[in-house]
Structures are given as structure tokens and as C-alpha cells.
Amino acid sequence: QVQLVESGGGSVQPGGSLRLSCAASGSRFSLTMGWYRQAPEKERELVATITSGGSTNYADSVKGRFTIYRGNVKNMVYLQMNSLKPEDTAVYSCWSARGAVDYWGQGTQVTVSS
């Protein structure tokens, strides 16, 4: 059973930065991991993913502003969010998968407001 524990998030003014962290446990192997977000009354959407080999994928809305990267500890990933906009306000959830099973973190709130 893979478990995902997130940290980070909070409130920031437009143009500010935040970093989210996610630690996965329960797997001997390096996992593909990523972040999704869901704003009020909107569908959940992909933010960014990173494979075990380090290949990344980003939503068009965050390209050039967000960076996903792996830490030195196995199955630790970070999402560096710069130049934040009010439309980035959402609950951000860490994601991973093993086989056909998806795993999710508990979610962390990111609020961008002046």
C-alpha cells in the first residue's frame, strides 16, 4: 500500500512563491508521481508529473512558472510554484500510481490572493 504525505501550501500574494512536498512510502521501487489540483466548483486537473527517470509533464497553464523535481530521498517530490496567480488557488493533491491503482495524498490548500 502506497501512502502519500504532503506538506507545504498556504496563502500567498499574487506573484509570490510556494513549494509543496510529497513523500511516498510503501514501495521499494521509484514511482511516477505528480500533482493535481481542484478549485471550487471545477474539475480536478493535472498540474505536473515526473517519472522515475525524471521525465516531466506540465499543464499548459503552469509551464514556465511551476517546476516539479525529485529529491535525493527515493519517492520524494517537490513542486516549486513561482509567479503565482489567483487562478492557481485550489486544493493540491499529490498523486502516484502502481499498476492500475492510483494513490492520493490528503490534499493541501493553496490560496493566492491580495
Image (spheres, rainbow, N blue to C red):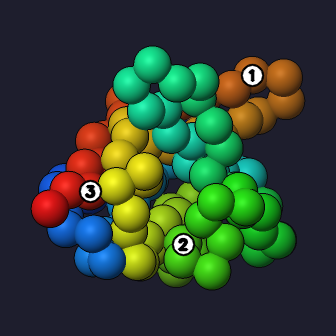
- Tell me where residue 30 sits by quadrant: bottom right
Residue 114: in sight, yes or no?
A: yes
Identity of the amino acid at label 2?
A: Phe
Most foreground residue, 10 or 83: 83
Cα distance, mark 1 to mark 2?
A: 26 Å
Mark 1 vs 2: CB contact within 8 A: no
Identity of the amino acid at label 3?
A: Val
Q: Is residue 91 left or right of residue 62?
A: left
Residue 55 lies, in percent from the top left, at 82, 71
Q: Secondary structure at mark 3?
A: strand
Q: Residues within 10 Å of mark 2 (few under 14, many from 20)?
A: many
The residue at the point 19 percent across, 68 percent down is 13
Residue 5 lies, in percent from the top left, at 37, 43
Q: Residues within 10 Å of mark 1 (few under 14, many from 20)?
A: few
Identity of the amino acid at label 1?
A: Val
The residue at the point 56 percent across, 48 percent down is 35
Which label lies toward us, 1 or 3?
Answer: 3
Cα distance, mark 1 to mark 3?
A: 32 Å
Most foreground residue, 34 or 75: 34
Residue 70: in sight, yes or no?
A: no
Residue topped by disc 2 = 66
Sequence-wise, the earlier of marks 1 and 2 is 2
Residue topped by disc 3 = 112
Residue 12 lies, in percent from the top left, at 19, 64
Q: Is residue 19 left or right of residue 10?
A: right
Residue topped by disc 1 = 101
Q: Secondary structure at mark 2?
A: strand
Query: Any mark on residue 51, and which?
Result: none
Mark 2 vs 3: CB contact within 8 A: no
Q: Is residue 106 above or below residue 22?
A: above
